[in-house]
Amino acid sequence: MRNVTIRVEDDRGNAVAYFTSRFAAGQFAPIRSGKHKADLQLRVEESYLKKVVELADEYLNHSSRLDLDWLSGHIKAVYNK
């Protein structure tokens, strides 16, 4: 089992919130607020999340428009260490 924490940051890089999910048996558990002994921490900007929420219908219809570089770039960096 692995705890994955997402750190939500403002435009200055300050933490606004933390959300943690557990990955086990190939599935993610529901997300909880806060840090819970994270094995992996990812960062995403609050402004990006707000944009996705505001344009939710567009992203649901065209999911290829989601910018997931924040996710894939960090994971590569962690596993290449």
Image (tube, grey):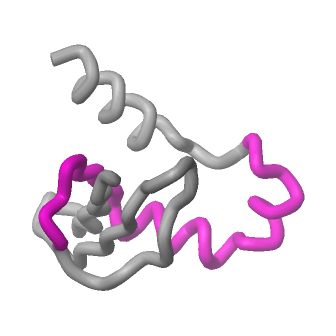
Q: Residue at x 81, y 63 (%)?
A: 60
The C terminus lies in quadrant: top left
Q: Position of residue 36 (x, y in %)?
A: 18, 72
Residue occupying the point 61% across, 76% down: 53
What is the magenta range? 36-64
Name the residue nearer the viewer: 78 or 7: 78
Drawn side of residue 69 relative to residue 63, left or right: left
Asked if residue 51 lies in the magenta stretch, the reply is: yes
- Going by the picture, which residue comes out furthest to the top? 80
| Residue found farthest to the bottom | 33
Q: Is residue 50 inside the magenta stretch?
A: yes
Q: Is residue 14 positioned above or below 32 on the image?
A: above
Q: Is residue 67 left or right of residue 77?
A: right
Residue at 43%, 56% in the rendered image? 23
In front of the other: 30 or 53: 30
Q: Residue at x 75, y 60 (%)?
A: 59
Return the x and y of residue 37 as percentages of the image width and height.
13, 64
Q: Residue 24, percent across and down?
A: 45, 55
Position of residue 1 measured from the top left corner of the image (x, y, whole percent)? 34, 53
- Residue 61, compared with residue 31, is above or below; it is above
The image quarter containing residue 17 is bottom left
